[in-house]
Image (cartoon, helix red, strand yellow):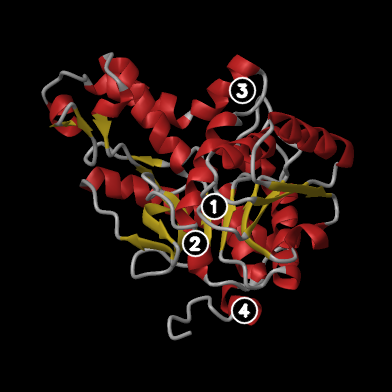
Amino acid sequence: MEFLTNDKFTIVGAAGMIGSNMAQTALMMHLTPNICLYDPYAPALEGVAEEMFHCGFEGVNITYTSDIKEALTGAKYIVSSGGAARKAGMTREDLLKGNAEIAEQFGKDVRKYCPDVKHIVVVFNPADITGLITLIYSGVKPSCVTTLAALDSTRLQSELAKYFKIPASEINNSRTYGGHGEQMAVFESTTTVKGKPLKELIDEGILPAADWEALKTRVIQGGKNIIELRGRSSFQSPAYLSIEMIAAAMGGKPFRWPAGTYVNDDKFKHIMMAMETSITKDGVTYKEVSGTPEENKELEKSYEHLCKLRDEVIDMGVLPRIEEWHKLNQYIDNPTI
């Protein structure tokens, strides 16, 4: 049986709904025969492992542990959903303090047990901030860490497909950028509907402006809607997309959606945010996002919101001041290394 790699792949938070779905998805996609499941809650973790054994996957070595040293030692790829989940009435930002501290410890554990890891995908919210914290404390190159942001773009695709009553495959290049939260920037200028620019459909009134605004709100509130419908935060979609991301980092099919990445350029400084990205075996790269003046303004607002969250984490003492980040991670803002 062929796999993308034989390297060890560790799923952190594997006893949870996202983590357990990631495990099954990774096994079904034949990413690697060496998968380690980690969670501090041992009984539920054993239950997930037993379920995976009972699937009868061929040619794989599934291990599980509640010892973080055992889980991370030798790991070349990691996806972490190991934070608290969002509950009814909460925003992603409400999770900030607790999950920021979890991200700090996770980054330190990566530095200690697998400093030569090839790629990490951070899923737990607020992912832009937990991913940034993980990057700083892990000491790895910025190209080695991405965060899940694609859900917002897939939700935009889904809402447009429902509105026009066409298959989602006929909605191309639907994009949201910036933060994975209430302040995301939903773009119209990138998208085509059955080959026609979405902006033209809006300008011509085929998609009335009021309907477009309502649709954008549904995209932004997509996660909240799942909680209201199912009584718990989404898990199948983030699990699948995060495994697609790590598969791309293993050399698999290109990842089709924006990802959160570390950005420090002329426009945006010292932040993790969703950009137009490419994930390969060599890591993640991004290119500048350029939309209409209104879209660029929304992206700027999203960036400013993320900066406020980042600064809150600094005020909490979880992160040091920006000018000291390089003491923890030599690769931060040092393109010569």
List the residue tagged with mark 3.
227
Q: Position of residue 138 (x, y in %)?
A: 66, 69
From the image, state whether disc 1 or disc 4 is nearer to you: 1
Secondary structure beneath label 3: helix
Whether the residues at callouts 1 and 3 have beta carbons within 8 Å, the answer is no
- State the CA–CA distance, disc 2 to disc 4: 15 Å
List the residue tagged with mark 1.
128
Whether the residues at callouts 1 and 2 have beta carbons within 8 Å, the answer is yes
Whether the residues at callouts 2 and 4 have beta carbons within 8 Å, the answer is no
**The quadrant where residue 145 appears:** bottom right
**The quadrant where residue 28 appears:** top right
Amino acid type, label 4: Glu
Q: Is residue 279 above or below residue 40?
A: below
List the residue tagged with mark 4.
324
Question: Which sits earlier in the primary sequence, circle 1 or circle 3?
Answer: 1
Q: Is residue 208 above or below residue 24?
A: above
* Callout 4 crowding tier (Cα within 10 Å): few <14, some 14–19, many ≥20: few
List the residue tagged with mark 2.
271
Any part of residue 309 in sight:
no
Question: Which sits earlier in the primary sequence, circle 1 or circle 4?
Answer: 1
Secondary structure beneath label 4: helix
Q: Is residue 197 above or below residue 30?
A: above
Amino acid type, label 1: Asp
Going 54% across and 21% down the picture, which residue do you hit? Answer: 225
- State the CA–CA distance, disc 1 to disc 4: 20 Å
- State the CA–CA distance, disc 1 to disc 2: 8 Å
Amino acid type, label 2: Ile
Q: Position of residue 57 (x, y in %)?
A: 65, 36
- State the CA–CA distance, disc 1 to disc 3: 21 Å
Front-most of residues 161 and 245: 245
Amino acid type, label 3: Ile
